[in-house]
Amino acid sequence: MKRLLSLTFLLTVVGVFGSSALAQAKYIPTEMRKGYASIDQGDLRAKITYLASDKLAGRGSLQPGDEAATVWIAGQFALAGIDPAVTEPTGLPGYLQTFKVIEYRPDRVNSTITLLRAGKQTVWHAPEAFGTYKHAVDLSAPVVFAGYGITAPELGYDDYAGIDATGKIVFVFDHEPQEDDPHSIFNGTGNTRYATTRVKLLNAQKHGAVALVIVAEPNRKHPTNAERVMRIGGSLARAVPIPLQALETDAVTIPAVVVLDDVAKELFATSGTTGSELQTALDKNLQPRGMDLPDTTLTLHLVNSSERTGSISNVAGMLRGSDATLAAETVIISAHHDHEGSIPCPDGQGGVDEKGQPTPAGPNCMQIWHGADDNASGTAGVIELARAFAENKDRPRRSILFVVFAAEERGLLGSYWMAAHPLRPLSTTRAMINFDMIGRDEKPSPQTDGLLDVPADTENRLNLVGAPYSPDYDRIVRHENQLINLQIDDRFDHEHVLNVLFRSDQFPFMLHNVPAMWWFTGFHPDYHHISDTVEKIDFPKMQKILQLAYLVTWRFAQDPTPPVFVANPEPVRAVAPVAIPATMAKGGPRD
């Protein structure tokens, strides 16, 4: 048994010495100490400097800079002594899980959505109605309304009850019921897994639908998703939009269409009611309001101006656990390596170099989305923790899978691929730590203005996203944080406007009931702008976050009882501080 100092004395000492890894390492069990003390700001700076360099040109998916990043990450895993986690087609071990994606550009001018009613046609174009799919689409079908498009057996809720969607186009509201009600069964004012378009598409497919049409909730008190995205600007407001990408082989096989309010009013015109009335009724008692829309047939004509197929790769290495039985179980530490790429500077405009200095306009000028925080910071964090765990002579009992995903910016493609083609069984994956933007201080930005309160001081703050789905996970993080003393913030588990729960690589694993959280230092004005450069990274804060992740990972990989996933989450409650106990068994948990 190892004696630990009392919590009061320990925190006093840490206060004197600051957050130095060497000072804190005295209070870390011997078998964990070397790895903990090795987490180094200089290492992090060197890694982010390379990943966010002009040389990698913004690491755009399917672009040479991102391919170079994947090769470099694999080399970093090898240098750290982390074993390859992938069996390549040749049968040899490797670090790259390679898969195919289709890159396509929707033709907004020539794509149409047509309503046929009473022998007359009404034709809509973007932005009134617009759909996307990786291949051209031509189909016609009657329309059925299905509430929010949600089937949630554990909540006793089913928008498809009493309707037949087979061979039809399903029309649904965005988000989920009662989102302004803190007592809602749908996680109060926070999101659940059911609010995202992908889950609604899969549910529509399951019920036999041929397409999904989505409209923002008629009674909403927030911007639509499209309006929120346009607030961001930067790469999302390019004159020539970034091409879309989709998995060549994917569970989703039907197209999605987004329509504006006026189009929705037309679709409801023969129903005898309005969208607002239907939403009010649904939100009041959660009883299904699905129905066929009389004399309502839609024709979807979706055209792509280009399509091409390419290969991209997740990078994965593994530290095998020390226990003969528990080594078959897995803890995942992840991030994503891609960002938004680069383009020639628009006429008369300059760019920003990798050090954040302006570059002059001219024929050789490039605008590069460096992505130092998003997500060179997370990628560097995964590599640093892989190296730290490999430093230890002793290993935890469960295995740790270190993964850096591809094409997160194109729709979480790498993580959806791995969740569908896991390297180790998801049924025995006990927890996941996902790093996405862990290098900055959160600041107000156009995306959050008026929608989310940002604390005045975020210098020591870490946001965790996903706690309602695993209170056990949350308790362990807060317990281990007593040594690190970050401010843990759960605001994003209580909001439904920014859709944060769905926006990083932990989400595909949550859909498979894996306890998973997004570790996140928050949005800032440089998010998805060329000004997200390395000199703005807060390396002391990053070090603290990785120290906490190291301690938490050890717990996940070592504790007799791992975190439990909760399929029916309740809103997160305030968590009381937990005292560090006086003793701890070697290799065991802090009870």
Image (spheres, helix red, strand yellow):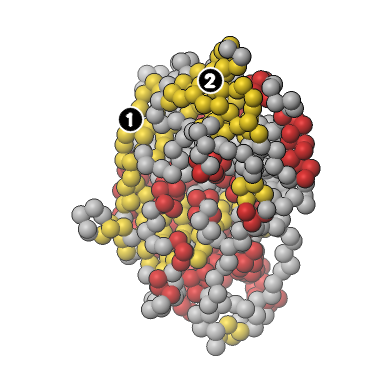
Q: Position of residue 542 (x, y in %)?
A: 54, 55
Q: Kindly give the residue lying farthest to the top in the view shown.
A: 120
The label on residue 113 is 2
Q: Position of residue 16 (x, y in %)?
A: 65, 69
Residue 555 at least partly seen: yes
Residue lying at 24% horizontally and 53% vertically, measured from the top left:
89
Q: Nearer the viewer, mark 1 or mark 2?
A: 2
Disc 2, SS: strand
The quarter of the displayed image where residue 94 is located = bottom left
Residue lying at 77% horizontally and 50% vertically, measured from the top left:
182
The quarter of the displayed image where residue 163 is located = top right
Hey, what amino acid is under mark 2? Ile
The residue identified by callout 1 is 308
| Quadrant assignment for the C terminus | bottom right
| Mark 1 → mark 2, Cα distance in angstroms | 24 Å
> Does residue 336 appear left or right of residue 467 in this picture?
left
Residue 65 at least partly seen: no
Local packing at callout 2 (Cα closer than 10 Å; few below 14, some 14-19, many 20+) is many
> Does residue 490 appear left or right of residue 386 in this picture?
right
Hey, what amino acid is under mark 1? Arg
